[in-house]
Amino acid sequence: MSSTRIIAVSGKGGAGKTVITALMAIVLREVPRLRLLLIDGDPSMSHLARILGLRVERTLEDLRGDVIKVASEGDEEEKGEMVKSLDYYLFEALVEDKGFNLLAMGTPDSPGCFCPANTLLRDAIETLSKNFDMTVVDCEAGLEQINRKVVRSVNRLLIVTDPTLRGLQTADAIRKTADRYTHYQEMGLIINRIRSPAEASKIIKEAATLQLKVLGTVPEDENISKLDTLGKPITEITSDAPSLKAVRKICESLKV
């Protein structure tokens, strides 16, 4: 692997981007010797960690809290040590699992916007990704993290939508915002929760009118809902599950 690659996964809330990210992780961890980093960038809840069945002990927001405390209460020596050790603390927050590492953003304790947390997340992505062959970021739903330049430099921006006009409109808005604030090499649309070939054909035609490049479609899959109902991680999904097969095909087409 000659260089680090960063993939950001975005989309409207409820479109299933976290599930798509998790399925991508299942596919990518099969690549021999690939050092894979997953970043759970949702500040409201660690959805990616949850569906992967991972227990997060320490988040990026916990680290930010420590920095604030040392800055306000610590002496000059403590402040200096904190600055020099930030990279170490970032790695300490990683959750290791078979085939990948995961960093969760966490939820800010104080009210207000997520701007400071997003700034730290942006810096963490840029710092940690240098130590991995591939980084996949499950972004917060909507435009915020694109607009705030949290993912300001990525190889691929994948936008996940459900088969609705509203989903396509959100995807178009994300694309336009990314054109202004994100340096990306390739962008594409993944249409999730397809229920029939006719539905797929219709939504692909609608995407074409918005000049959105469709990378692939992922069918509605009862295997995922069954695992969720049973409280089991998505990593237990069977290899012949339609959703996993579809995501595998997308990853192959992207050559990731």
Image (cartoon, rainbow, N blue to C red):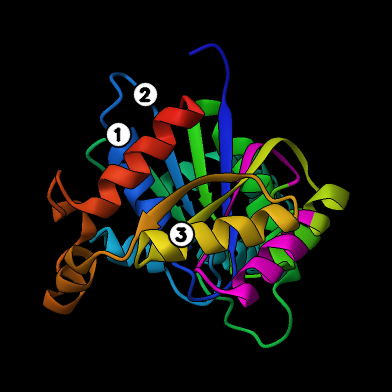
Query: In the rendered image of this protein, does residue 192 appear above or below residue 12?
Result: above
CA–CA distance between discs 1 and 2? 7 Å
Circle number at residue 200:
3
In contact (CB < 8 Å): disc 1 and disc 3: no
In contact (CB < 8 Å): disc 1 and disc 2: yes
What amino acid is at disc 2?
Leu
Nearer to the camera, 213 or 79: 213
The residue at 57%/64% (across/down) is 66
The residue at 42%/68% (across/down) is 46
Residue 251 screen position, x and y as percent: 42, 35
What amino acid is at disc 3?
Ala
**Would residue 177 be found to the left or right of residue 88 on screen?**
right
**Would residue 18 be found to the left or right of residue 123 on screen?**
left
Query: In the rendered image of this protein, does residue 2 appear above or below residue 22?
Result: above
Region rendered in magenta = 152-175
Label 1 or label 3, whichever comes before in sequence order: 1
Question: Which residue is identified by label 1?
Answer: 29
**Would residue 87 be found to the left or right of residue 222 on screen?**
right
Badge 1 crowding class, 10 Å Cα cut-off, few under 14, some 14 to 19, many 20 or more, is some
Label 1 or label 2, whichever comes before in sequence order: 1
Which residue is situated farthest in the front direction here? 198
CA–CA distance between discs 1 and 3? 29 Å
Question: Which residue is identified by label 2?
Answer: 34
Which residue is situated farthest in the right direction here? 180
Q: Magenta segment: does it hold 56?
A: no
Nearer to the camera, 11 or 37: 11
User: Which element carries disc 2, helix, strand or loop?
Assistant: loop
User: Which element carries disc 3, helix, strand or loop?
Assistant: helix
Query: In the rendered image of this protein, does residue 4 appear above or below residue 127?
Result: above
User: Which element carries disc 1, helix, strand or loop?
Assistant: loop
